[in-house]
Image (cartoon, rainbow, N blue to C red):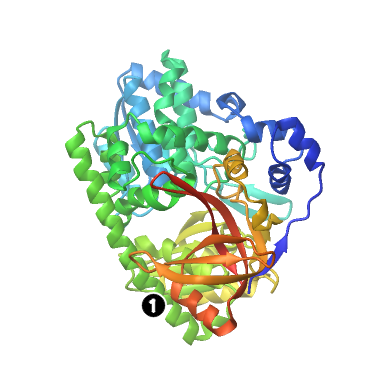
Amino acid sequence: MEKWVVSAKKADFNGIAQRYGIDPLIARLIRNRDITEDEEIRRYLFATRKDIPDHRLLKDVDKAAVILAKKIREGKKIRVIGDYDIDGVTATYILIRGFRRAGANADTYIPDRVADGYGIHEHLILRAYEEQVDTIVTCDNGIAASEEIRLAKEKGMTVIVTDHHEIPFTEEEDGRSYHLPPADAIVNPKQPDCAYPNKNICGAVVALKLVTALYIQMGIPAEELEEFDEFAAIATVGDVMELRGENRILVREGLKKIPHTANTGLRMLVQACGLENRKLTAYHIGFVIGPCINASGRLETAAKSLALFMEKDSEKAQRLAENLRSLNEERKSMTEQGVKEAVAMIDSTSLSSDRVLVVFLPDVHESIAGIIAGRLRERYYKPVFVITRGEKSLKGSGRSIEAYSMYEEINKAGDLLIQYGGHPMAAGLSIGEENLDEFRTRLNANCSLTEEDLSEKVVIDAAMPFSYIRPDLVRQLELLEPFGKGNEKPLFAVKNAIASSVRVIGKNRNVVKMNLRQPDGITMEALYFGDAEGFLADLAQKGSVISATYYPEINEYRGVQNLQVVLRNYQ
């Protein structure tokens, strides 16, 4: 059951509005995001690249760059080992492009999700050794691969880890003991003694910091780093990083450049997705472009997405982009079927009473387990693990809610798992089938979530009647973009509006269009995206008077602009 709450944070909204030339409502929205000091407000509204922290604060980044510069000058063979998701693919692209620009004899390997699994495994070390690789550089993985990296060191290889995942640890009486791999350099802002202020950069941005340091070592102009702006933005949104501070700057700058990117492959992907000549937002990365990049790593090989970004020939890039879009359509269909199966299982078994859902879907493709887990989390507002049958063991992917730190909780059950890793909000694991029931039991026994934790809170920025919505205000809302995790899209609300002219539109019949009239007589065109049939059924059963949360937009059709609202929640 949703709990609607109106944010009531106080500040001198009129004073802020006058100082920064904005509407008092915009000042309220900024305060609601806990941005209070003048310098914070300035950075939030007007920050530039100059506000990004110095890369040298990142522990070992210069050390790693010095090692790489020496290896490049000596002509040593370097291999980048990445990951098969959007962050791993873009991180791999940034490193291989940067290394080769610096003159490196470098190649890449992105592990296959099914054949190799996540991260750097022993067989990848042995293969690199046989192929006379001198130096391995990981990206978006490696921080939990102590044994594998120890093997590489025993074989005489140099290893540099670039990663952003949590550092493995054990709880001891006097606090946590962290376990770092024996690499020659480790670039990860989550190291306890790393001074870098933004602990929430994605793997691709960590990779970009290393390339930045390498370019300085090799005397390459800093301006050349700007070719990676689009990829830093795509990875930051795609890996669901907080859009605050540096991350927000990176995404905002990248979004400006994607529509006219110099990267042939990315340009063809934008075209394949039907996004040419559009003002792009973080939504387009998260729900249109990003899923296509991820689709190759889910259903075939992520090397296809990397090949797309490396491709210079327009015709070849176009074919690759169309293939990725087609794979994503296939992935969507498989996801819908998996969600349907999971919901039927949860609703008809004892799983429905669990506070942490562990759902075993043996026949679901392991690559879409995380997407299904995310959809189930939205439906039930509980932490969810979806477990599937892999080639050698069961594989699982989890998605969490704010009150449940997923990585910390599975760490408590680490003795049951073959391998695991992740963040507070998401995790991946492999487990023997014999341990699955105990895993579910242990997670629920350890779970301290309360009923309040399990009630989704809908935070409304302001109760705002339609009479307040003006074109200039809607345009000012763009100052707050990009929206995403940590910088949520503003949410407004109206009470007791009467819905009329209600109809379902769209080729998939998933959009409801209507007019909403407030008690004061002011009417606004409104759209609702989602379960259209459910919306109509609720109106028929409970009457046409609804309260709703919304976001205002300017709709342009054939040169004519009209105000409208897009509904998010309704009662």
- Return the x and y of residue 157 as percentages of the image width and height: 37, 33
- Determine if residue 161 is in view: no
Question: Residue 458 versus residue 390: which sits nearer the camera?
Answer: 458
Up-down relation of residue 159 to residue 281 (above or below): above
- Return the x and y of residue 269 as percentages of the image width and height: 30, 43
Q: Amino acid at mark 1?
A: Glu
- Return the x and y of residue 35 as percentages of the image width and height: 72, 41
What residue lies at 19% left-to-right and 32% top-to-bottom? 313
Question: Residue 407 versus residue 255: which sits nearer the camera?
Answer: 255
For this view, does 372 lie left or right of residue 73? right
What residue lies at 71% left-to-right and 55% top-to-bottom? 462
Q: Residue furthest left?
A: 315
For this view, does 312 lie left or right of residue 514? left
**What residue is pinned by disc 1?**
341
Local crowd at mark 1 within 10 Å, few (<14), some, or many (≥20)? Answer: few
- Return the x and y of residue 81 as percentages of the image width and height: 36, 40
Quarter of the picture holding the C terminus: bottom right
Quarter of the picture holding the N terminus: bottom right
For this view, does 513 lie left or right of residue 177? left
Numbered disc 1: secondary structure: helix
Q: Residue furthest top?
A: 219
What residue lies at 70% left-to-right and 32% top-to-bottom? 21
